[in-house]
Amino acid sequence: MARAVDVPAPSLRQRPWVRRAAPLLLVVLLAVLPLVLPESTNETLARIGVFAVAVLGLNVVMGYTGQVSLGQIFFLGLGAYITGYGVQQDWNVVLVFLLACLGAALAGLVVALAAARLGGLAIAMVTIALPIVGVPLAKRLSDYTGGSQGLSARFADAPEATGLYDDQWQLYVVLVIGGIVFLLTRSLVRGKFGRAFAIVKGNEAVAASMGISPYRYKVLAFTIASLIGGVSGFLYMFVIQYTSPETMSFGHSIELVAAMVIGGAGSIVGSLLGGAYYVLVPELTNQVDSSLTALLQGVVLLAVLFVLPGGLASLVRRLGRGRRRLRAEPGPGASPTTPLSTAGSATATEEPGTERRGHA
Amino acid sequence: MNMHSRSRRAVGIALATALALTVSGCGREGDAAGGGGGGSRAEGAASPGITDTTVRLGITTPLSGATAGPGTCTVAGVTAYFGAKNAEGGVQFGDGKKRTVEIEALDDTYDPQQAKANYDQLKDDVFAMTAGLGTPTNRAWRDAAIADEVPQALIMTGDPLFSDPEESPWQLGFVPVYQNEGQAFGELLAASGAPHKVAILSQNDDYGAGYVEGFKSAVEGASNIEIVEELTYEATDTSVDAQLTQLAATGADVMFNAMSLVPLAVSSLQKAQQLNWKPSWFLPSNTSSPGGVLQPGGGAAFPGVYSVAFSKAPAGPAAGDPDVVEYLAALKQYGNYPDPPAFPHCQWSWMVGATLEQAFGEMTEPTRDAFMTALRGISGFEAPLMLPGTSVDATQAGQPAVSSVVVQKFNGKGYDTVEAFE
Amino acid sequence: MGTFVQLVVDGLSAGSVYAAIALAIVLVHSATGLINFAQGGMAVLSVYIAWWLTTRGVPLIVALLVSIVFSIVFGALVERFLMRRFERGDPDTAVVVTIGLLTLITGVAGWLWTYNNQQFPSLFSLDTVSFLGVSVSQRSLGTTAVIVVVMVALQALFIGTKLGLALRAVANNPESAAFSGLPVGRLLMVGWGLAAALGAVAGALVAPQLTLTPGMLDNALVYALAAVILGGLTSPVGVVVAAWLIGVLENLAAVYVPFIGYDLKVAVPFILIFVVLLVRPQGLFGRKTVVRV
């Protein structure tokens, strides 16, 4: 899979045998791991895969294109509901998968066509509306969604022919689908579209002057993010096998944004780390003291960002670069159009030398 | 399945060299491929989570977030119950052994995904799952519990699905299904004979809908009852003033308020008084606490506030009751819950402890199978804190462990059981 | 007709609750350029302190004053020792830090005071005032009156005082503010302290209605954010008007538009935002900001 290869390690990468052998080694490793790991680890890894894909989608629109989306969980929920409904109707699983992707992408496109006309914080507010309206909407459409009692869909039992256990089968499916999504997204953001996204994020006026329509690229990024959200919804249903309106509550959408920033905005590895954070921190805090989970999660979040403002991916990058000093910026850097703040704070330069000059 | 990890690893290493993916299943002996569960063991061999001296129970319930108040109670009650029993040396099991009961509770923040994750984490370490609060959070791992043959016993949801032994062989709800509670009040009202106009305000989910369904089924065909308006609210709403305004305008003389949130129940009572609308009022069992809802809401201003219950309230007339005294002391000492609880879930959870002890005492083998059989055999058991006229009866198909409730009326301090609507 | 007017009045009361938190968000945004998701959490913390004092027999008004002083100090400390590290970095990171702070504060409140509902005494009585067949509680009237006073004070602060001007200058461009000799760090602390104090007032106003829990303001926060965006980030008056508009229209839509109903009324503010911002991107009362290339 792409994730470990993505770590920029120029010195190693220059050696051709590493470039060829590393992905192969990784594939072998990922093929074997599900067989040797205990069941509960496999289940945790599968959940990490689900949310890593969701965070990856969020990264496309927010990390790479700079448009704050507080609605990513809605597309996960939509994908999960479509999957659940399709499975209950006994549709072909491949068809169900395609419908989950396309349904979410279509919904994303419609929202984006409207929302991308707005700038900055307004996009954030329109996207907040998705989970907030999505929850009562899911209840109202109870003929399809099962209302507040939710939808169960048990379709992830391992086929007899494979001889696998359910948890192994689920993890393989997550690894294959998630791996493909990660690879495709990686080539997307590294190619022509990725450069256009970065320019739109950097400065919309500049983008327009270069013949790049900010509107069209924002819509594109948002639609892709929704599509990936739909994929994560399918995987959610595959692994959790149940969804209800609570799946897409507003709080989870905020947690996804937090996971993205903690993993590392605008980073493929960061998406994976964000997914791991989303799944592992609640498990960890539950182990420490289940009555103090909120307190502990807050401490962990603040501690991680205090040490690594660029997210966990910056740590990976730092390890990759060896002794080279790392600057605390995850992606192409803060920009005047980055929403959730006005132009003022965002235009501040990141040079440590100028920091706090006025305070003296 | 940590117990099989060694053999799985060996298989994995073999496969690493062969790179053949298809023969991997043989890593786990015993189970049928694809089962993944812990059920099919040799007859009589102990299930996971139980030894000759201890038994371990798992709970997944909201301990943070909006439902953490009642969620914390679901853990505190049963923890206090077995804390007190452990201090006396443990619980006597039907196989003649005395075991101490350990409880591992995890926080799911009312998130189905997290509940499933918690279940996955607990399922191999615990003998049974119990007491967790919430419909979606319990539904999220119901299928998995059935496949793994892990008991999901005496959980806190009124969703009827969990009490259907055909659909849910390893499940049993504890609290009455929501329909029962609504029905009990509906019957009382219909039996009054006098004409009543009823306004309904219910939570827009299975909880509210269940109450309304039960109420309507009871008043169906009763010519003296007319439902004049039926509105809903969302659990995330900060105010229900508009609904109250609309309902007050109907001039109804009975308000059926299927509300599970304490703040909104309080402000409903307050708003009605501001509008000078004082109907007889029905509140469900979990939002009718005298101290937590009716005093701040000014319940005494209404001609009657009715509720249904099966447990004694720690405040009010039952305060001196020996059951209540023992319960509150244990809650403080072993349940990490110093104040008298404002949520009935603490009492219910305490009764879950007593019911579990009853099942343990009848269970002749240390297996999950034997436990479910023993549990489903309990009938006519008057758990501590139970009101006269109610009992635990797990033998009725389609009903949870508790299906009998009594209707009560607020007397200004606590509740009295009533036979008729006045 | 009576019902209609009553629904409007109910909507205004609900809007005042949203406005209270929205004003604090506007203040911190004007002073630091950030949206603070922890604004509600910080307010809840100070309400808990006031509540805890009242349970120890301290008179309500004294307890409130103590909690306001605590909030100023707490807000300033949060800025100095937490937010300052992130103020010049990626703004998304700073916002996520405020989300972390909200989680932490909620957890601390739950740990110290449990997740149970606590009754918080009100400054205003629940007695009803009736006019033209409409009833409104003194509490709602009092809340609204305080909100209006705070709104006017804030508007005056930003437009008419040196401090307000300096705060805005720092938020708009910390670099040039520093060059022109403004004590940027101290001003940021003042901004956070003031916003936290305002949050404490807002929290104390709405706590009797919502009952005190660690997550008391979580649901209202979304409405407050909607009001902030709709009213224009820079205008206290605009934000309060927007909050009232949201409260009233939401009620009317729920009752008189059958398709919306009580379950989907939450969509109303967002539809409103969408429509208004298409026409006026800076919000109802906001100033247009020029984006530099």
Image (cartoon, coloured by chain):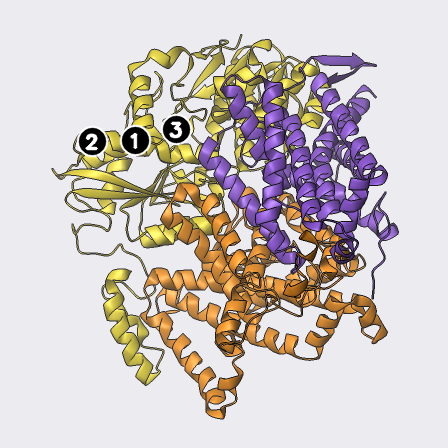
Chain containing the residue with disc 3: B
Q: Which residue position is annotated with label 2?
A: B87
Q: Which residue position is annotated with label 1?
A: B334
Q: Are marks 1 and 2 in contact (CB under 8 Å)?
A: yes
What numbered label is drawn on residue B98?
none
**Do discs 3 and 1 share a chain?**
yes
**Do discs 3 and 2 share a chain?**
yes
Chain containing the residue with disc 2: B
Q: Are marks 3 and 1 in contact (CB under 8 Å)?
A: no
Chain coloured yellow here: B
Q: Amino acid at mark 2?
A: Ala
**Residue at left offset 36%, top offset 72%:** A33
What numbered label is drawn on residue B346?
3
**Residue at left offset 75%, top offset 16%:** C135
Q: Quadrant of the N terminus of chain B?
A: bottom left
Q: Camera-side residue: C66 or B45?
A: C66
Chain coloured orange here: A
Across and down, in percent, residue A133 comes to: 67, 46
Q: Is residue A142 left or right of residue A321?
A: right
Chain containing the residue with disc 1: B
Across and down, in percent, residue B231 comes to: 66, 29
Callout 1 crowding tier (Cα within 10 Å): few <14, some 14–19, many ≥20: some
